[in-house]
Amino acid sequence: MTSDAFWTGIFGRPAPVEVEIGAGRGAFLFAAAAAAPERNFLAIEHSYSRARHLEQTALQAGLDNVRVVRADASCVVTSLLPDGALIAFHIYFPDPWWKRRHHRRRLFTPAFVAGLHRTLVAGGRVQVATDVSEYFALITKLLSAKFTCAPQTPAFTAPTRFAEKALQRGAAIHAASFIKRD
């Protein structure tokens, strides 16, 4: 099955696909989907209640270009998504898993980065933002092995709850766009 057939089966139409991992309440997801109706958006959300809320909100808003999957993002990216099938990933404020014994639960691992690289088209991008400087340094190190870093503030079409909280407490937001190298 081609990636076009795969996405047409999910969205009912062929269109470029962007993925948001950890969409939370959907501030970015819904703003981006409304601003780019010619694209499809897949949200991967681990929380059942959040995923359900996202689905209901997208339906009520008439956003036919949004789909939500409740799953572990690492598993979806490394095992389920087709090769070269996406134009972008949006990963804003991933859980840093502060305690050393919990670092194994972090989203960004070499296997996850390999999955991002495998699933993106040539020139595809990974947009990342976090308010945890140490975690951003690790993310940058991992992604730089397969991607070219273009430091910038991602164009948030709507600030996420975590971005708002970080800014309210005066934290710096570390953000970059990583472009796939072949």
Image (spheres, grey):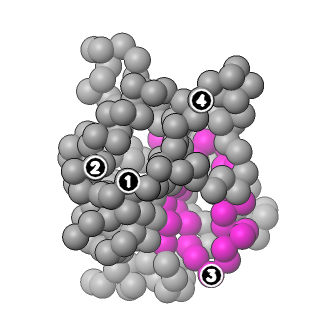
Q: CA distance from mark 3 to mark 4?
A: 33 Å
Callout 2–callout 1 Cβ contact below 8 Å: yes
Percent x, y of residue 11 = 53, 76
Q: How many marks?
A: 4
Q: Is residue 23 magenta?
A: yes
Question: Depth check: 112 or 173 in front?
Answer: 173
| In this view, 9 is above or below 156 | below
Q: CA distance from mark 4 to mark 2?
A: 21 Å
Looking at this view, name the residue that lies furthest to the front: 151
Mark 1 falls on what kind of element? strand
How busy is the neighbourhood of tag 3: few (under 14 within 10 Å), some, or many (20 plus)?
few
Magenta segment boundaries in residue numbering: 17-46
Q: Say the numbered circle drawn on residue 144.
A: 2
Q: Which quadrant of the figure contains the N terminus? A: bottom left
Sequence-first disc among 3 and 2: 3
Callout 3–callout 2 Cβ contact below 8 Å: no
Q: CA distance from mark 2 to mark 1?
A: 7 Å
Residue at 37 percent of width and 63 percent of height: 179
Which residue is disc 3 drawn over? 38
Mark 4 falls on what kind of element? loop
